[in-house]
Image (tube, grey):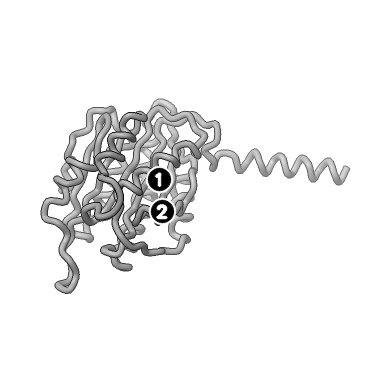
């Protein structure tokens, strides 16, 4: 009897754990949050980015956007990228279907350590993200890479090549260009970074980009971006208004 109870308990634990995993689930969207942690991103800016995604995922409006889909759930993972040799998954694929599961994802992200990188390879980040879709194990109606960064790609192959290959696989790439004012001793963000993202990074059905000029507005921009891409009807504008 004792052994039988242990087996039943183990099976129950597996059953209860299943909803947090993306394996074999049908979802409206498979979403990769791909965040720049290159040397141009200092610790404070990296923390602001992380907090922006955490706050957005804790917002009821994101949960509402998820529930508005035909299936009512998405698969999501959070990764950080820098050089062609530096990419890491911070939070693996999870199924998010309501406010509770969204906040659970945010809690995992909040507990993860911040690790900075070196050079900036947007193409390396895209290529790594494309491979992550194979690990999702989900059946997604749409596949989207949400990539944020604060500078041009300066290492690896052109990001437009990686973007075009991703589009050929049915993947949409949205962008968040970080163009905040920096300390005088730091290199300024390119004045046309938003246009660079428009021309070289984003692509696919309904693709769009946002530009963030003030880190105080980062959380609001991330919230707007997540709602747009989660609830996308494939007709989102190339440039979204971030207020």
Q: Nearer the viewer, residue 153 or 212?
A: 153
User: Which element is circle 2 on?
Assistant: strand
Q: Residue at x 73, y 44 (%)?
A: 10
Q: Position of residue 13 (x, y in %)?
A: 67, 44
Chain-order first, disc 2 or disc 1 = 2
Residue 224 seen anywhere in this rendered image of the structure: no
Which residue is label 2 attached to? 87
Image check: 114 left or right of 119?
right
Label 2: few (<14), some or many (≥20) within 10 Å? many
Toward the left, the furthest residue is 191
**Contact, mark 2 vs mark 1 (Cβ under 8 Å):** yes
Q: Position of residue 49 (x, y in %)?
A: 31, 58
**Residue 234: quarter of image:** top left
Disc marking residue 229: none
**Residue 224: quarter of image:** top left
Q: Position of residue 240 (x, y in %)?
A: 18, 41
Q: Tag count in the figure?
A: 2
Q: Position of residue 148 (x, y in %)?
A: 28, 50
Disc marking residue 128: 1
Q: Nearer the viewer, residue 86 or 221?
A: 86
Image check: 160 left or right of 108?
left
Using the image, determine if residue 209 lies above or below residue 213.
Answer: above
Q: Residue at x 44, y 28 (%)?
A: 71
User: Which element is circle 1 on?
Assistant: helix
Image check: 174 left or right of 239?
right
């Amino acid at each position: 009897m004792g052994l039988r109870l242990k087996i039943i308990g183990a099976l129950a634990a597996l059953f209860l754990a299943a909803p947090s995993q993306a394996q074999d689930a049908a979802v409206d969207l498979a979403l990769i949050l791909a965040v720049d942690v290159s040397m141009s991103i200092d610790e404070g800016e990296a923390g602001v980015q992380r907090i922006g995604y955490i706050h957005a995922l804790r917002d009821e409006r994101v949960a509402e956007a998820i529930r508005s889909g035909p299936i009512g759930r998405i698969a999501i993972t959070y990764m950080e990228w820098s050089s062609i040799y530096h990419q890491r998954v911070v939070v693996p694929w999870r199924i998010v279907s309501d406010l509770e599961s969204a906040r659970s994802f945010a809690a995992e992200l909040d507990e993860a350590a911040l690790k900075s990188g070196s050079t900036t390879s947007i193409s390396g980040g895209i290529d790594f993200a494309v491979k992550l879709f194979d690990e999702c194990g989900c059946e997604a109606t749409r596949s989207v890479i949400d990539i944020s960064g604060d500078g041009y790609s300066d290492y690896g192959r052109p990001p437009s090549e990686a973007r075009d290959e991703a589009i050929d696989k049915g993947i949409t790439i949205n962008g968040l260009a970080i163009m905040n004012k920096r300390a005088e001793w730091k290199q300024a963000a390119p004045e046309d970074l938003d246009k660079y993202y428009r021309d070289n990074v984003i692509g696919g059905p309904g693709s769009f980009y946002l530009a963030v000029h003030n880190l105080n507005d980062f959380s609001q921009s991330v919230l707007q971006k997540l709602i747009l891409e989660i609830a996308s009807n494939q007709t989102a504008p190339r440039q979204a208004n971030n207020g």
